[in-house]
Image (tube, helix red, strand yellow):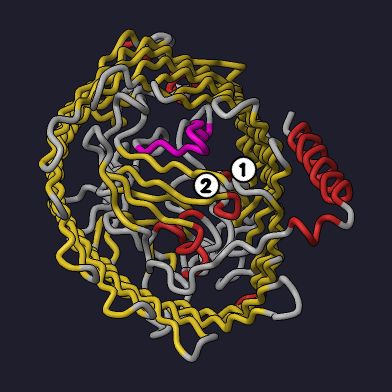
Amino acid sequence: MVKRGKAALLIFFILGSSSILFQGKSFSQTYRLEPVEVVASPVIEGNKVTEYGSQITTVTKKQIDSLNALDLPSAVRRAPGVNISRYNLVGSYGGAQGGAIYIRGMGAERPGAEIQTLIDGQPVFQGVFTHPLMDLLSVDNVERIEIYKGAQPVFLGNMSHGAVNLVTKQKTTPGFETKIGTAYGSYSTWNTGLAHGGKIKEFDYYLIGSYKTSSGHRENADGQLQNYFGRMGYDLSKEWRLSFTAGYTDNWAQDPGVAGSTKPPVIPRFTTRDAIYDFTVSHSHSWGTGQIKLFYDDGLVRWRQYDSTRREQFDSNTDWDNQGFKLEEKLRLWPGGEIVLGYDYLYYGGKFEEVRPAQTRRLEDTFFYNSAPYLAISQVFGEKIQFIPSAGIRYNMSRYFGDEVGWQAGLVMRYKETEFHAQYARGFNLPGVYVVYQYQVWNLGDSWKNLKAEKIDHYEVGVTQKFTSWLKGDLTLFWDYGKDRLIFKSPPPRFENLVEYHTQGAEMTITLTPFPELEIFVGGTYLEKSPDDLPYAPKWTFTGGLAYRFLEHFLLNMDGQYVADRYVSNPRYPTATPDKVGDYYLLNAKLTYRLKWKQYPVQTDFYLAGENLTNVSYEYLKGYPAPGITVMGGVNFYF
């Protein structure tokens, strides 16, 4: 079924090319070169607080480019409170240590997941084993990345102890824009891409294609990413809009194995292909905004592995189909007030097989669903001093696991350059389709239906202060209490809702702009956890970065990070010996020479980027050394 993804993207490119040809000579007359800020905020664009007390960290395309990020983990790894794990320079091997993101200690569970990943609000995840896959979430398509660092039970629902939403590109002003770029670097790493967008009266479109490959910093650490994306939009009126997007990815990555271990006769390889579709009708009136979104996600995993105990190759094949719709209306029916009425329906699952020489085990097509109405309300009181209390509730009806209620309450206070926020949220995380297969293998029948949802209580308070025109900062305190976490027990083999855990900490960011050509960012996270071996929850994380323009044409971006030692084991299997990896610090930089041609509407960026410039030895997983110093040079053309 993923072949339909290629067909849909071909249609997009034909339509986009036709629209350019249709313009003919008028193309040069209607062309507009979008203004490009010379100095963009380093590391993150900033933090914002919604009317419902949720804090969102935003990373835009400008930060992605300045970090020379090739994928989602590398784009968000400098954001305070975010940590990552990976094996390779290009491509994520699997959905766990080989390629994953973690937010304030959340996101380590495999199978399953605590963090929801979305594209334009559409959930994108491996439908059988539930967890997100980084290679399905290309950063080449995005305008910005929104990172939710606390539970989102009302607006996002299941599997959202944290969340990452990728907002894709859209041409909103008349005319056309094109970007063509290529880069080459250490270990035969290539990054090539084309992006073109246009808006002709009521019609707009965007077309994107990219290709990345690397031989890897270790033997058998090679990988490849292919990404294609298209959008078509049409303004029916000033208030109503239609939008259709389609994306297709084709990726693979290999497992280099533990350093110093014997090379297996078969090199494990993780291959993913995925096609996603999104049709949205939206409106915007003075009295409110709303949308209806229909979406479909058709993907597969082909995982070649080697069993050293049996000395045989085996293959794990997963095919999933996730589909659903989202209805939401934000009504402003009286001064300062807002009511949100919504309904989500998600039908997800698929089939799985493990193929061995002597036996093939199969899970035939199996699907779960979540059906969830939700309601939220907020009210602004005051003018000079604003008080915004809010509350919301979601009632989730699932197939097999009964009903769950998620709720939240928040308060935002604003006075001049000061903003205070507080929030409580009760989230839930249901077992995935994987439990059906596991219990089938363990000959336990339908007893998996007795499992319960994992729960979390999230508390957060924070303050944001703009001290002067050149100095601003924020401080956030947070507490998370989790219970009923699913863990593996034996004998007999099974999952049980047993473990409780607790995290608490503080997060701070400071932005300084001493003069227009220079901006500096500093951020840090302090995290306490219980039990002490909670994985991917370092006690200290520090991040810093700067953007500096000099000599008119030059732009220097630098960023650095320190991550304390941490455990990296899977919490679903507490019987395994917890691994611990040491602390590390990294220093990276990118130097850009920007040239604007007077006689042509073209901007050219030549750049040289380097990572781990101090050649530090570090690892994300025990026995998997990360790359030393790497460099990449490239050029981008903007029309």
Q: Nearer the viewer, residue 386 or 371?
A: 386
Q: Quadrant of the N terminus?
A: top right
Q: Position of residue 378 (x, y in %)?
A: 22, 25
Q: Are marks 1 and 2 in contact (CB under 8 Å)?
A: yes
Q: Is residue 117 magenta?
A: yes
| Mark 2 burial class by Cα count in 10 Å: few <14, some 14-19, many 20+ | many
| Element carrying mark 2 | loop
* Amino acid at dot 1: Trp
Tell me, yes or no, if residue 186 can be seen here: yes
Q: Residue at x 24, y 59 (%)?
A: 566
Which residue position is annotated with label 1? 303
Q: Nearer the viewer, residue 288 or 522?
A: 288
Q: Residue at x 71, y 65 (%)?
A: 639
Q: Position of residue 549 (x, y in %)?
A: 44, 82
Q: Can you tell which of label 1 and label 2 is closer to the viewer?
A: 2
Q: Position of residue 306 (x, y in %)?
A: 59, 48
Q: Nearer the viewer, residue 639 or 3?
A: 639
Disc on res. 94: 2
How many dots with numbers? Answer: 2
Q: Residue at x 51, y 85 (%)?
A: 554
* Amino acid at dot 2: Gly
Q: Is residue 72 magenta?
A: no
Tell me, yes or no, if residue 621 can be seen here: no
Task: Tell me which label, 1 or 2, sits earlier in the chain.
Answer: 2
Q: Nearer the viewer, residue 355 or 172?
A: 172
Label 1 – label 2 distance at C-alpha: 8 Å
- The magenta segment is 115-126
| Element carrying mark 1 | strand
Side of 611 relative to 114 (left or right) = right
